[in-house]
Image (cartoon, rainbow, N blue to C red):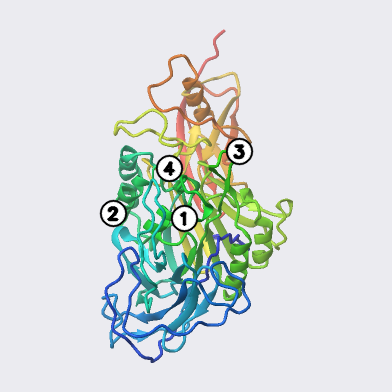
Amino acid sequence: MNGWISRPAMCLVCRGVLAAATLLLPGAGARAQTAAPDKGNPTAVEPEGKATAAIAQEGIAQEGIAAGGTPQGGIAQGFVFDDRNGDGRRDPADLPLAGVRVSNGLEIVRTDEQGRYQRPLGEEWQVFVIKPSGYRTRIGPSQLPQFYYLHRPSGSPQLRFAGVAPSGPLPQSIDFPLTPQQEPEVFRMILFGDTQPRNLTEVDYIAHDVIADARRTEAAFGVTLGDIAFDDLNVIGPLTEAISLIGIPWYNVFGNHDANFDATTRRYINETFERHFGPSYYSFDHGKVHFVVLDNIDYVPTPEGKFGFKGGFGEEQLNWLKRDLEAIPAEQMVVLLMHIPLNLTGDHQALFRLIEQRPFALSISAHQHYHQHLFLGEQQGWKGKQPHHHIINVTVCGSWWSGVKDERGIPHATMSDGAPNGYSVMTFDGEQYSLEFIGAGNDRGRQMRIELANEVPAEKTTRFHVNVFDGSSRSRVWFSLNGREWTECQQVEESDPQFQRLWEAEQQQQPPPSPKLTKPTISSHLWAGELPSGLTPGTHLLRVRTVDLAGKEYTDERSFRVVPTER
């Protein structure tokens, strides 16, 4: 397979997500002078002129729109244009972009030949552009894409962590500048699962343990898959500054630990996230791939008057998704990015019905603090021709920065499945893709750990384990002893032996002086083999080879001593 995966059907979950546009041809049209972008709404501009009249609602009942069809917030209108001089303002030399998709979070429209769009906007809604392939939005501080306008006339309510600042009256024109850029068919993206720092000390762990290595990776953009913070949302600013050192545009997914837990209603649970990153659901195209960023965190009130959460999309999202997919070509690769795994999301069956006939699709989450490949099929209610591939991504913080510290003063943070903390890099080539697991502090070529004692008895068989960090049920693993023939290992459903020992050591009366590890879980990427009895005493070499589901091959080796059995 030449290191590539090309398989059908991914999941798309979203809380009102939008679709990316096709590549657009510029047209001719009127232009207007623009003012500087509003603070906190980087794409919003207010040119001279008057807002146009309300447009038809297409029979869709929407929150924030009066019974007579008049939006309580007003009409959002503006232009999408080719920002030829890169100043973010719509100038006479700038060309309008026709056919670009713009959404208010419920509906999606295309710009006309003059690059103009109109959509109704509720009192506290947003409007955003769907970046088409071959263009980029403006990039703001900390490498954050500026693709949205948040309409919060009075700002967010008083919360422990600051929300969106007052936007004031709806601007007469909300314009979105785009700039052409080269987007090769082959490109890479960086995936961070759960960075989740509790404080600035853990932000420093991330900077030195993961970001310093990621700076060496050539990628088009990166994504953090939720749980950006760990309840203290004041760390988001310093963390995004640190991630910006990687030097590429960085998108963000909303996670359950990124919420305003002192909000009095569900409506305001995302306010701090939106202040930093904009809408919690959106999409964009890059190259030949359509990406959708989703909010599948469903917050529900508890009897104590607080908020708990569960995985859920909601009817509004699914209705939006149906409209979104109607505009996406059937053969286009679709990648869904969410926080909670798809199989743990309550209404995923309704989502399946919308995507299971698509031949090329993939979904990616985090949340679990282990790394796993799922192939969702008939047993999970999937009705597509081939199982749907869902990746639960390695987390940056691993086991929440627990475990003994290394020589740098950073906890080893091994995940509960025995894999190291770290990140992944995904490479796309049209509808094909492959994933590279990068363990923090590891050589990039190290994709496994062989678990075998330094000394083994000569007259007994000896079992060993291989943890293939990015392994799956579709991987294969072999071993060779002293350069002889290859023997296949068997995948086992067990906890990682090394992680089990580390965890058991912490249960003693005098545990190591470090944050305690999480309890071991059954690893989905563990193999076992058996060394024969009767080996000659002395030093031997065990070699291990694995081939992953994309056809990529990795090897590792470990030496050991055979000692005579005591009599």
Disc on res. 253: 1
For residue 484, which quarter of the picture? top right
Q: What's the CA distance linking mark 1 and mark 4? A: 15 Å
In the foreground, 524 or 299: 299
Mark 3: few/some/many CA within 10 Å (<14, 14-19, 20+) = many
- Mark 1 or mark 3, which is nearer to you? 1
Quarter of the image that includes the N terminus: bottom right
At label 1, the amino acid type is Val
Where residue 137 sits: x, y (%)? 36, 71
Specify which label sits upstream in the sequence, 2 or 3: 2
- Mark 1 or mark 2, which is nearer to you? 1
At label 2, the amino acid type is Leu
Q: What's the CA distance linking mark 4 and mark 3? A: 42 Å
Specify which label sits upstream in the sequence, 1 or 2: 2
Callout 3: helix, strand or loop?
Answer: loop
Specify which label sits upstream in the sequence, 1 or 4: 4
| Label 3 sits on residue | 489
| Label 4 sits on residue | 231
Specify which label sits upstream in the sequence, 2 or 4: 4
Q: What's the CA distance linking mark 1 and mark 3? A: 38 Å
- Mark 2 or mark 3, which is nearer to you? 2
At label 3, the amino acid type is Cys
Where residue 365 sits: x, y (%)? 53, 52
Where residue 234 sits: x, y (%)? 34, 46
Vertical comparison of 451 with 76: above or below: above
Specify which label sits upstream in the sequence, 1 or 3: 1
Whether residue 328 is visible, yes or no, is yes
Tell me, yes or no, whether the two marked residues, 1 and 3, touch with CB atoms within 8 Å.
no
In the foreground, 155 or 77: 155
Mark 2: few/some/many CA within 10 Å (<14, 14-19, 20+) = some
- Residue drawn at 35 percent across, 43 percent down: 206
